[in-house]
Amino acid sequence: MNGLRAVLVCLVFACATLVSPAGAVTPSWSALPVPGAAPPVTVSDLAARGKGEAWATGYEHAADGPRPMLYRWDGTAWSRDTTFPGAGEPGWLGKVRFVGEEVWILHGRAGEGQILRRTAGGWSAVPLPQTLWTYQDFTAVPGAAWVVGEDATGLKVLHYDGSRWTTQSTPDGVLFLMGITARTATDVWAWADTSTGTTVLRGNGTAWRDAKVPLPPDSNVHTILPEPSGRVTVGGSQYTDGVARTYLMTWNGHAWRTTYPPLGDTSTEAMARGPDGALWLPVRSDRAFQSKYARVDGPRTTFSYGPERGGAIDVKPRALTKAGFALLSFGTAEIYGTKPNLMSERLGG
């Protein structure tokens, strides 16, 4: 009888192992080689369209100043693209956006701004209607693009409808636009510094209004993620007694819900919706030789580490994006005795 009981216990444990999530194979992060640049390097953005196309931007530090830096992922490997106008001149590259079959990138060149456009025929440039002192942010969707910044007269919101540029006004009290993003040509979001604090704005393509988002008191906004489903996620920091803590706000089509995941004072600027439906973002790692990522899925937050990098003293993913069934990250890794250079990692796929 005791022998039969032992057999039954073993069978129960075996079945539990087969069906338990802990017994399932969990994808892990892997390192992707990236051709080096002139260190130290600065990463601006990363965006993907499916599993076989992603673009990463930034600038390297050459002897005569910053030089634009553009990398392409083809589903197998990273390569550097130097075929765009101004690739060999001083400048920088900013946000990447996909507009139909085209790739659009904000480009600072010789002190002026332009938008790089990549079509089936190659790269071309769309000049901005005026030079700004600061090019704060850029976004584009089919039928529209926006560039926000400042010139000698103050805040500027430049709007492109595919054929011409116009300047848009913002509500009274808006001092500065810190970022902008769009779902469609008639649904665009921005976060602003105003005379009363941080405010979220929403535009219909021609006019802007206060979106009446109930941000936490004494808070700022790092990013806004509007999704095709209608869901919108706002990420930022709230300050209490001088200490910052990360918050997330989600609009489900009816109401805003605010949560405070255990992320400390992590910036949500690089936050992305993963292929698993959860929110992912890089966080400050407690291991100098490994990157660290947070996965926020409703009330549950979990963490994972990138691959170990021998001799690394600082590994910093700067941007994340969904690429098919995988997550891609792009950032910098500093190996002892050298300046930070480029790194990339992939989860799943």
Image: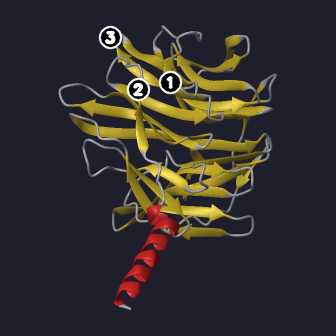
Outermost residue toward the bottom?
Answer: 1
Question: Where is mark 2, residue-wise?
Answer: 33
Question: Where is mark 1, residue-wise?
Answer: 77
Residue 347 image point, x, y percent: 48, 43
Residue 338 lies in quadrant: top left
Residue 266 image point, x, y percent: 40, 54
Residue 281 image point, x, y percent: 47, 50
Q: Marks 2 and 3: in contact by CB < 8 Å? A: no
Q: Marks 1 and 2: in contact by CB < 8 Å? A: yes
Outermost residue toward the left?
Answer: 337
Q: Amino acid at mark 1?
A: Ala
Question: Disc 1 to disc 3, how far (Cα)?
Answer: 28 Å
Determine whether, in the image, residue 29 is placed left or right of residue 253.
left
Residue at figure coordinates x 55%, y 55% from the top left: 279
10 Å neighbourhood of mark 2: few (<14), some, or many (≥20)? few
Residue at figure coordinates x 48%, y 32% from the top left: 44
Secondary element under disc 1, as helix, strand or loop, is loop
Q: Amino acid at mark 3?
A: Ala
Q: Is residue 79 above or below residue 5?
A: above
The mark found on residue 63 in the picture is 3
Residue at figure coordinates x 49%, y 46% from the top left: 269
- The N terminus - image quarter: bottom left
10 Å neighbourhood of mark 3: few (<14), some, or many (≥20)? few
Residue 27 image point, x, y percent: 47, 49
The mark found on residue 21 in the picture is none
Determine whether, in the image, residue 177 is placed left or right of residue 80.
right
Q: Marks 3 and 1: in contact by CB < 8 Å? A: no
Question: Disc 3 to disc 2, how far (Cα)?
Answer: 25 Å
Secondary element under disc 2, as helix, strand or loop, is loop
